[in-house]
Image: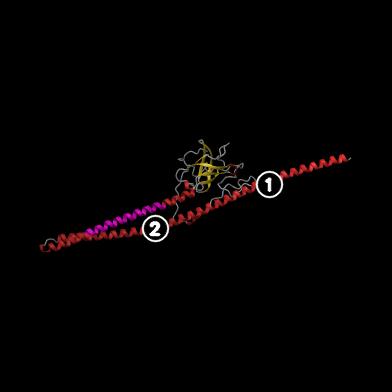
C-alpha cells in the first residue's frame, strides 16, 4: 500500500512541477511582449516630440517670411514716393531749361544794337553757364531716377521670389534636383528615413519616388525634415507587389506640374491657413492592427485590406498632359 501512495505522490509532484514550468514560461513571454510594447510607445513619443519641434520651426520661418514681405512692401512704397518726387523735380528743371532757352533766343534777337553787344554777350555767357548747370542737374536727376527704378525692380523681384519660395514650401515642392538613398526602412510601420534634409532642399509634403536598379519600388510622402535626413510615409497602394523598401534604395523627387499661386499682400487668412501644421503621421494608431487610425494623406490604415486612392495616380499636381509619365501607374 505504501508503494501505491509513493507512486501517487510522485505523479502529483511531477504534475505540479510541470504546471509551474508552464506558468513560468508564459510569464516570461508576457514580460518580453510588455517590454517590446513599451519600447514601441517610447519611440513613437520621441518621434512625436521631434515632429512638434519641426512644426514650431516652420511656423517661425513662415512668420519671419511674412515680416520680411511686409518690410519690403513698406520700402517699395517709400521708393515709389521718391520716384514721384524725382520725376516732379525733373519736370521743374526741364521747365526752367525751356525758360532759359527762351531768354537766350530773345537775347540773340536783341543783338542789333552795337552798344548792347557786350552786355548781351555777358548775359549770354551767364545764360550758357546756367544752361550747363541745369543740364548737369537734369542728368544727375535722370541718373537718380534710373537708380531708384533699378532698386525698385530689384526689391520687387526679391519679394516675388520670397512669395514663390513660400508657396513652394507650402505646396511641398522641392526646388532643384534631388537624388538620395534610403537610410533606414521600417516597412512594418509604413515609413522610412531618407538621407538628405532641408540642407538638400527637402520640404514637408514633398513627393519622392523609390527605385532599385532602375525599377520602381514605391512612392513616399515626406512628413518630417531635419538637417541631414527626412522621414517619409510609404504612400498606401504604391508599393510594387512582392517588394519591400530596403536601405540603399535610390530616391528621387517626383515630377510635379507646378501651378502658379497668387498670394495677395496682407492676406492674413491665407497666412494663418499656411501656418497650420500638417497631420502627424506618427501620432495615430495606423501601425496597430487592432484599431487603425485614418491615414493623414487620405488613405486607410497601413496594411489594411482596402487601399486608399493613390494621391499621385489620380487628380492633383501629377495629372498634367506635359508631365513625365508616372512609372508607378
Q: Nearer the viewer, mark 2 or mark 1?
A: 1
Place residue 116 in its image quadrant.
bottom left
Task: Point out the stretch of residues depicted in magenta.
Answer: 131-159
Circle 1 crowding by C-alpha within 10 Å: few under 14, some 14–19, many from 20:
few
Q: Position of residue 309 (x, y in %)?
A: 56, 43
Task: Indicate whether 129 appears above or below 255.
Answer: below
Residue identified by numbered label 1: 31
Residue farthest along the right direction in this orientation = 1
- On the rendered image, what quadrant is the N terminus found in? top right
Q: Residues within 10 Å of mark 2 (few under 14, many from 20)?
A: some
Would residue 132 be seen by someone viewing this image from the given angle? yes
What secondary structure is marked by label 1?
helix
The magenta stretch spans residue 135:
yes
Residue at 26% across, 60% down: 93
Q: Which mark is residue 322?
A: none
- The circle on residue 75 is 2
Residue 129: within the magenta?
A: no
Can I make out residue 106 in this image? no
> Which quarter of the picture shows residue 89?
bottom left
Rendered residue at 45%/57% (across/down)? 67
Q: Is residue 226 left or right of residue 112?
A: right
State how far apart marks 2 and 1 are (Cα).
66 Å
Relative to residue 71, is residue 195 drawn left or right? right
In primary-sequence order, the first of circles 2 and 1 is 1
- SS for dot 2: helix
- Residue 278, horizontal then vertical, whole percent: 54, 50
Magenta-drawn stretch, dominant element (helix, strand or loop): helix
In the figure, is residue 67 to the left or right of 294?
left
Amino acid at each position: 500500500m505504501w508503494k501505491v501512495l509513493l507512486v501517487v505522490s510522485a505523479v502529483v509532484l511531477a504534475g505540479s512541477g510541470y504546471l509551474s514550468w508552464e506558468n513560468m514560461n508564459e510569464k516570461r513571454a508576457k514580460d518580453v511582449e510588455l517590454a517590446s510594447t513599451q519600447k514601441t510607445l517610447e519611440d513613437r513619443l520621441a518621434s512625436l516630440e521631434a515632429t512638434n519641434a519641426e512644426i514650431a520651426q516652420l511656423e517661425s520661418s513662415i512668420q519671419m517670411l511674412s515680416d520680411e514681405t511686409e518690410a519690403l512692401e513698406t520700402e517699395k512704397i517709400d521708393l515709389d514716393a521718391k520716384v514721384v518726387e524725382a520725376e516732379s523735380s525733373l519736370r521743374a528743371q526741364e521747365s526752367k531749361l525751356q525758360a532759359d532757352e527762351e531768354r537766350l533766343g530773345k537775347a540773340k534777337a536783341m543783338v542789333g544794337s552795337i552798344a548792347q553787344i557786350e552786355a548781351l554777350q555777358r548775359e549770354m555767357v551767364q545764360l550758357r553757364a546756367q544752361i550747363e548747370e541745369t543740364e548737369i542737374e537734369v542728368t544727375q536727376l535722370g541718373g537718380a531716377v534710373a537708380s531708384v527704378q533699378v532698386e525698385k525692380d530689384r526689391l520687387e523681384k526679391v519679394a516675388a521670389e520670397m512669395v514663390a519660395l513660400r508657396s513652394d514650401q507650402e505646396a511641398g515642392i522641392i526646388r532643384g534636383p534631388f537624388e538620395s538613398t534610403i537610410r533606414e526602412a521600417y516597412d512594418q510601420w509604413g515609413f522610412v528615413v531618407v538621407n538628405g534634409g532641408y540642407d538638400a532642399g527637402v520640404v514637408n509634403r514633398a513627393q519622392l519616388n523609390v527605385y532599385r536598379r532602375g525599377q520602381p519600388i514605391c512612392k513616399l510622402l515626406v512628413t518630417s525634415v531635419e538637417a541631414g535626413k527626412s522621414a517619409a510615409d510609404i504612400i498606401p497602394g504604391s508599393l510594387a507587389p512582392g517588394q519591400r523598401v530596403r536601405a540603399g534604395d535610390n530616391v528621387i523627387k517626383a515630377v510635379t506640374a507646378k501651378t502658379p499661386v497668387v498670394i495677395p499682400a496682407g492676406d492674413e487668412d491665407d497666412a494663418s491657413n499656411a501656418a497650420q501644421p500638417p497631420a502627424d503621421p506618427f501620432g495615430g494608431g495606423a501601425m496597430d492592427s487592432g484599431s487603425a487610425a485614418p491615414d493623414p494623406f487620405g488613405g486607410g490604415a497601413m496594411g489594411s485590406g482596402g487601399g486608399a486612392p493613390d494621391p499621385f495616380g489620380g487628380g492633383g499636381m501629377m495629372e498634367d498632359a506635359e508631365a513625365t509619365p508616372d512609372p508607378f501607374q
